[in-house]
């Protein structure tokens, strides 16, 4: 089921808004206040961080190196699948601003597609697993579906 933003259940909308707002504020404490202690995060270049301390540390380091002040904007929620136990599988497309990589290469503004597994927590959904993928616009032009 694909859901437009106005149709999102409040808990999903709140989680995604928190992710966007805390990224744009470069506030890793607030960003990972909505994560489980055993979170897993696979980033756009295939790094796999496990556990809240490691995931948060990696983000802090990369924000200091290249992401502080780089805007993130939600473009679309492409899929929300309710799972047993109140879990939600969410696919969201983001627009990330231009930035310089640690090696100095300029990455232009682009899209990312993120899959999120969220679990119910005491005050809303919590991020348990993320896989984030850069969208290659050249390849997308040849998508057969």
Image (cartoon, rainbow, N blue to C red):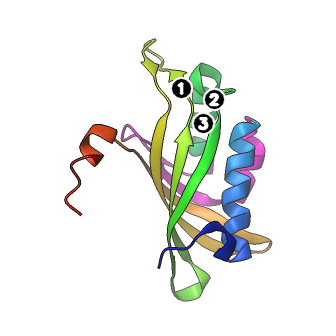
Disc 2, SS: loop
Range of magenta residues:
26-53
Mark 1: give few (<14), some (14-19) or many (20+) Cα within 10 Å. Answer: some
Q: Does residue 33 show up magenta in the picture?
A: yes
* Relative image position of residue 7 (x, y in whole percent): 65, 76
Q: Does residue 124 show up magenta in the picture?
A: no
Cα–Cα span, label 2 and label 1: 7 Å
Disc 1, SS: loop
Viewer-closest of 133 and 102:
133
* Relative image position of residue 62 (x, y in whole percent): 57, 28
Q: Earlier in the sequence, mark 3 or mark 2?
A: 3
Marks 3 & 2, CB-CB < 8 Å contact: no
When the figure is inspected, residue 63 is found, relative to residue 7, above or below; the finding is: above
The residue under the point 73% across, 34% down is 26
Question: Which quadrant of the figure has residue 118?
Answer: bottom right
Cα–Cα span, label 3 and label 1: 17 Å
Mark 2: give few (<14), some (14-19) or many (20+) Cα within 10 Å. Answer: some
Check the picture and name the quadrant holding the C terminus. Answer: bottom left
Disc 3, SS: helix
The residue under the point 57% across, 59% down is 38
Front label number (3 vs 2): 2
- Can you identify the residue that label 3 sits on? 59
When the figure is inspected, residue 104 is found, relative to residue 65, above or below; the finding is: above
Marks 2 & 1, CB-CB < 8 Å contact: yes
Q: Which mark is residue 85?
A: none
The residue under the point 55% across, 37% down is 96
The residue under the point 68% across, 71% down is 6
* Relative image position of residue 8 (x, y in whole percent): 65, 74
Q: Earlier in the sequence, mark 2 or mark 1?
A: 2
- Can you identify the residue that label 1 sits on? 98
Q: Which mark is residue 70?
A: 2
């Amino acid at each position: 089921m694909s859901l437009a933003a106005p149709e999102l259940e409040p808990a999903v909308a709140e989680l995604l808004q928190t992710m966007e707002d805390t990224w744009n504020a470069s506030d890793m404490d607030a960003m990972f206040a909505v994560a489980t202690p055993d979170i897993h995060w696979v980033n756009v270049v295939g790094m796999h961080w496990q556990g809240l301390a490691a995931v948060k540390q990696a983000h802090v380091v990369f924000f200091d190196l290249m992401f502080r002040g780089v805007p993130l904007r939600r473009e679309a929620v492409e899929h929300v699948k309710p799972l047993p136990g109140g879990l939600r599988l969410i696919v969201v497309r983001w627009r990330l601003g231009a930035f310089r990589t640690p090696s100095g290469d300029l990455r232009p503004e682009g899209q990312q597609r993120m899959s999120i597994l969220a679990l119910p927590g005491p005050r809303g959904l919590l991020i348990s697993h993320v896989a984030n993928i850069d969208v290659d616009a050249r390849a997308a032009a040849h998508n057969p579906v």
